[in-house]
Image (cartoon, rainbow, N blue to C red):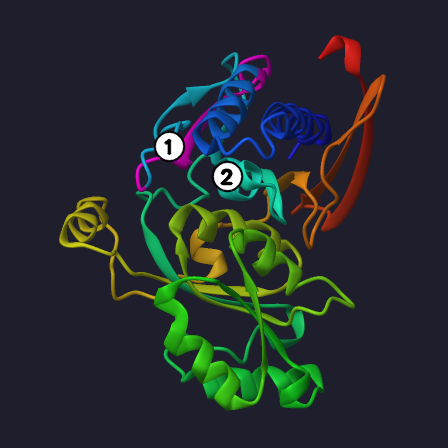
């Protein structure tokens, strides 16, 4: 993947982050999301490439969206797949909560799983435990195996879980196994990545979340040598039909490689509100400061970028 193109994508997530950050705390989730979507689309269309959104946000909550199948860019080579979330954690922005980002994952045409926007059961870990998890194992078995691989006592293992009623049983199982639970209101992409970062207090991600977030997380998790396993869990017959109509299997376990094939991959994220990955957008008198991360599959590099934007030119 061209390094300059990866930098162009940072500019896209930066612009979307600034646009959505202006809505922090106003209780307007759709307006915050819409601002990020509009800015992301506009910036994509200033870049010389041919991008296709293969999985995006919007269908499951009727939010503003860059829709699946949408074409962006000025056209011409390279042809690329895009998995996007213009604003991961819209409610966090609306209500001024912790952890929100703008996110893009990319790969050459045909490398990212194209799927409808529905739900997936997920488990993600870092490099040390990548080979010892299985979505068909019990919660206790996965925690025990991960603890052993990490050289930790079970009580030292921390599992991040979305704070949802559907996870009541899972949370009980994690605690019964002897591990810690870290609940997050939104943002399981950040949770999956955090499990792969060295010296991070998060060891595992478990639970059911969006399919878009599953593909988005697969790229950085794979680049960092971790593993994410996902299985579609459509919440209704209509969603199940959409998944099957897309030629996807609700019984199959999808690995990081299934979700994001090959090494020519990039992942870009910019913080909107401070979270486990990145600080948020900072508005100062004459400048706006953004904090981003960029991962490139070909080199395996992780870069953190702090950018000072002229406030008068925004």
Q: Which mark is residue 63?
A: 1
Q: Residue 179 in magenta? A: no
Give the camera-side residue of 268 and 275. 275
- Vertical arrangement, residue 78 with respect to residue 241, above or below: above
The quarter of the picture where the N terminus appears is: top right
Q: Residue 90 carries which label?
A: 2
- Highlighted magenta segment, given as a residue range: 43-60
Give the camera-side residue of 26 and 112. 26
SS assignment at label 2 = helix
Tell me how far mark 1 sits from mark 2, CA to CA: 10 Å
Quadrant in the rendering for residue 233: bottom left
Percent position of residue 184, x then y: 55, 59
Q: Residue 160 carries which label?
A: none
Q: For residue 52, say whether it is visible.
A: yes
> Residue shown at 53%/42% (left/top)?
88
Percent position of residue 313, x then y: 75, 9
Quadrant in the rendering for residue 182: bottom right
Q: Tell me the crowding category of disc 1: few under 14, some 14 to 19, or many 20 or more residues within 10 angstroms, Cα based.
A: some
Percent position of residue 118, x then y: 31, 48
Circles 1 and 2 in contact, beta carbons < 8 Å: yes
Q: For residue 108, say whether it is visible.
A: no
Percent position of residue 224, x then y: 67, 58
Left-right relation of 215 to 116 = right
């Amino acid at each position: 993947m061209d390094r300059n193109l990866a930098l162009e994508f940072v500019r896209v997530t930066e612009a979307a982050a600034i646009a959505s950050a202006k809505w922090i705390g106003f209780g307007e989730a759709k307006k915050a999301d819409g601002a990020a979507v509009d800015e992301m689309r506009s910036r994509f269309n200033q870049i010389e490439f041919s991008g296709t959104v293969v999985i995006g946000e919007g269908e499951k909550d009727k939010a503003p969206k860059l829709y699946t199948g949408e074409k962006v860019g000025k056209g011409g080579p390279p042809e690329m797949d895009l998995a996007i979330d213009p604003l991961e954690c819209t409610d966090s922005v609306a209500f001024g909560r912790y952890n929100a980002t703008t996110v893009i994952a990319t790969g050459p045409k045909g490398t990212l799983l194209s799927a409808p926007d529905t739900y997936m059961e997920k488990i993600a870990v870092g490099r040390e435990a990548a080979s010892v998890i299985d979505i068909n194992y019990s919660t206790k078995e996965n925690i025990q195996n991960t603890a052993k691989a990490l050289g930790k006592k079970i009580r030292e293992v921390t599992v991040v879980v979305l704070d949802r009623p559907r996870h009541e049983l899972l949370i009980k199982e994690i605690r019964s196994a002897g591990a810690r639970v870290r609940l997050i209101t939104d943002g399981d992409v950040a949770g999956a990545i955090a499990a792969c970062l060295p010296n991070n207090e998060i060891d595992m991600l478990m639970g059911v979340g969006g399919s878009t977030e599953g593909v988005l997380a697969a790229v950085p998790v794979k680049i960092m040598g971790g593993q994410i396993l996902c299985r579609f869990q459509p919440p209704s017959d209509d969603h199940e039909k959409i998944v099957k109509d897309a030629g996807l299997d609700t019984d199959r376990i999808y690995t990081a490689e299934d979700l994001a094939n090959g090494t020519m991959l990039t992942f870009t994220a910019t913080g909107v509100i401070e979270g486990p990955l990145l600080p948020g957008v900072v508005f100062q008198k004459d400048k706006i400061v953004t904090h981003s991360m960029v991962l490139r599959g070909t080199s395996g590099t992780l870069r953190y970028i702090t950018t000072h934007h002229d406030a008068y030119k925004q």
